[in-house]
Image (tube, helix red, strand yellow):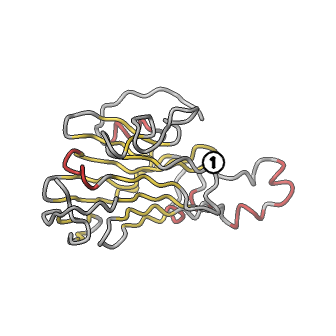
Amino acid sequence: MAINLQKVTIEKTGDTHSIDLTKRDNSNKEIVINLNWSQGQQAKKGGFLSSLFGGNKDIDLDLGVFYELTDGSKNCIDGLQFSKGQGGPRDRKTRQGCYTDAPWIWHTGDDRGAAAGSGENIIVNPQSLEKIKRIIVYCFIYDGVARWAETNAVVTIKVPGNPDIEVQMGQQNDPKKFCAIAEILISPTNMQVKKLVSFHNSHGDCDKAYNWGMKWAAGSK
């Protein structure tokens, strides 16, 4: 079942975007979830003493998703999960996901800086949306304190043929380092994208808040 993302319509109600998926053809334009950021100017003004005591340390942000497929399988994808050689290309199943087979979601790679590049991207295969039940998009500060305003970070969900759905992380001010950005619910005829922007202490805390029921253990890059 293919979905025409060039002809879908989008209806916004509050912080929820409802996208009509009833018009279908062989369109293969992927859905892109992008996180881009740069170190804020305030963090660069600390001078020598700030640098000496760690005040100028770059903030490392990571983009990720929880996903659940229609067969009930659940998992998450982010740079922490596929670190230490556990990732791979888009056509091979690894902890980085897979674009051409389940889960039909693939992370293009961990970006430790993002200042000069396109940040981090997760792509979703539009030809297999009917096999995906729900997604939660999140980002977290892997390294550095929770100074969201200093990141100038923006998370954008791009559905071809529709307005971008954007969350300005650089406008947030919360001491927690994990943020659930949006929830995507998919049915055969409709895709709803709801802004969440809720903050949590960890992957596990976010999991509990949205009833995912996955098991977690500490990890590092």
**Is residue 176 at least partly visible in the picture?**
no
Give me the residue at 57% from left, 61% from top: 37
Label 1 neighbour load within 10 Å: few <14, some 14-19, many 20+: some
Q: In the rendered view, does 30 fall on the left or right side of 95?
A: left
Count of numbered marks: 1
Question: Does residue 4 sit above or below 178 in this rendering?
Answer: below
Q: Position of residue 53 (x, y in %)?
A: 80, 47
Give me the residue at 26% from left, 70% from top: 6
Residue ID for mark 1: 145
Q: Position of residue 160 (x, y in %)?
A: 32, 68
Give me the residue at 70% from left, 65% from top: 42
Instruction: Check disc 1 and report its element: helix, strand or loop.
Output: loop
**Which quarter of the picture shows residue 143?**
top right
**Is residue 104 at least partly visible in the picture?**
yes
Kind of residue at disc 1: Val
Give me the residue at 53% from left, 59% from top: 173
Question: Does residue 208 sit above or below 161 in this rendering?
Answer: above
Q: In the rendered view, does 217 fall on the left or right side of 69?
A: right
- Nearest the viewer among 27 and 37 is 27
Q: Position of residue 205 (x, y in %)?
A: 41, 37
- Nearest the viewer among 12 and 90 is 90
On-image quarter of the C terminus: top right
- Nearest the viewer among 163 and 84 is 84
Question: Does residue 130 sit above or below 45 in this rendering?
Answer: above
Q: In the rendered view, does 58 fall on the left or right side of 99?
A: right
Extreme-right residue of the structure: 48
Q: Position of residue 187 (x, y in %)?
A: 16, 52
